[in-house]
Amino acid sequence: MSDHNKLNIYINSKNRRTDETPSNFNVIIPDGLLKVNSDEDFELTVVSFFCHNNFYHCNNNTNKFQIIFRRADNSIYMITDYLLTNGNPNVYDVLNNLNSLTSIYFSTTYNRINNKFTFTRVYAQDANYFNMYIKCINSGSFLGLNNNVEFLVTSGGNICLYPINVVTIKAISIGIDGDISFKNNNMESLNNGIYKCSDLILVKPIDVLKNEIIKYENIDAGESFTFDLGNRDRIKYFTLSVYDQDGNTITDMTDYLMNIQFTIRKRDETSKLLKSLIEYNKENYLVLGHIFDLINKLFNYFVKLISR
C-alpha cells in the first residue's frame, strides 16, 4: 500500500473570475479535497507551465521619465512627466518616441556601434531654465540611465551612461500566497545584498522569441521546484501572482496553463525514532556506568577485607 497520495491541479488562468487578471488570481479548492491527517505532510511540485511570450517590455513598470529645469541657484523651476509608449519597441522605436515627446527641449541621436543615445539640449538657457536634467523614474533601461538620478543635458551633447536595453523582462516568476505555508522558507535577493523570505515557486528564464511558447516541464521528475508545506490541516485556496525578475508585477501578463501537484505522504518518523533511540541509549549507558562504578567499589572493598 502506498504511503503517499498525489493530486494534480491543472490551472488555466483564463478561467479566473472576471474581476481578476492573469497577473493575480485565486484558485479555490473544493472543501476537503486537499487535507492531511495529523501524521501526514503536504508537498507541492510545479510539474509544468506554458504561456505565450507576448507581454510588453515597455510597460507601466518601465516607461516613465521626467524633464527637470533648475534655476541658476539650483532650485527647481519646472518638472514635466513623460511616458514612453507601451509595447515592444526596438531601439529606433524608442529613439523616435523620445524625439516626438521631447524635441522642444532636447534632441536624441543613436550610435549603433556602441548602442547608446546622445542627448543634446536645444532649449535656450536663461535664469529660470538654467540647467536641464533627464530623470528616469523607471525607464532607465530604455534611456541608458540610472533610475531616480538626474542626468544633466547640455547644448554640447551628453552620451547616456549605459547601452540601451529594450528587453526589460528576462524571466517570469510565479509566487504563491493565500492558504499556503512553507515548512522551510525560500529566500530571494533584494538590493544591497539583502535577502528576504520568498513566495516564489517557479522562476523561468525567457529563452524564446516573441510570440513563441515559454514552457517549463518537469520531465525528469527533478526537485528544483518542489516544496515542503507547513499546512497542518487543509488547503482551501491559494493565490498565484506573476512577476518579472525584479519583483515587478507583469500587469499585462498573458493567460497561462500550469500544473501543480500536491503530494500527501505519511510523515517520516525515522529521524524522530533515531533521536529517541539515541536518548534511550544515552540513559542506558549512564545506568550501566553507574552500576559498573558500584561493582568496582564493592570489588575494591572485598579486596581490602581479604588483604587484612
Image (tube, helix red, strand yellow):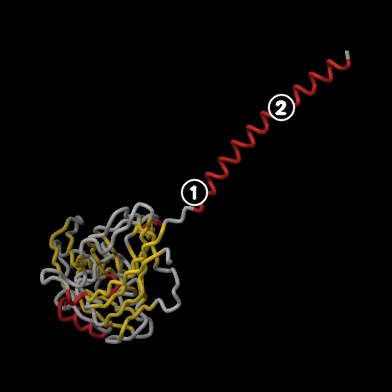
Residue 272: mark in rendering: 1
The amino acid at mark 1 is Lys
Residue 284: mark in rendering: none
Q: Can you give x and y, in whole percent of width and height, for residue 113 in the image?
A: 38, 85
Residue 16 to residue 304: above or below = below
Relative placement, left or right, of 66 versus 190 is: left
Residue visible at 54% across and 49% down? 274
Quadrant where the image shows the C terminus: top right
Nearer to us in this view, 108 or 296: 296
Residue visible at 15% across and 61% down? 127
- Count neighbours of disc 1 (C-alpha within 10 A) and say few if under 14, some if 14 to 19, many if 20 or more: few
Residue that numbered label 2 is attached to = 293
- Count neighbours of disc 2 (C-alpha within 10 A) and say few if under 14, some if 14 to 19, many if 20 or more: few
Residue 285 to residue 58: above or below = above
In the rendered image, the residue lying farthest to the front is: 1
Q: Can you give x and y, in whole percent of width and height, for residue 183 in the image?
A: 38, 55
Residue 282 to residue 77: above or below = above
Q: Can you give x and y, in whole percent of width and height, for residue 141 in the image?
A: 30, 72
Quadrant where the image shows the N terminus: bottom left
Which element type, helix, strand or loop, lies under badge 2? Answer: helix
Circle count: 2
Relative placement, left or right, of 288 versus 23 is: right
Relative placement, left or right, of 305 versus 124 is: right
Residue 110 to residue 129: above or below = below
Q: Quadrant of residue 128?
A: bottom left
The amino acid at mark 2 is Asp
Q: Is residue 233 visible?
A: yes
Q: Can you give x and y, in whole percent of width and height, for residue 135 in the image?
A: 23, 65
Nearer to us in this view, 38 or 183: 38
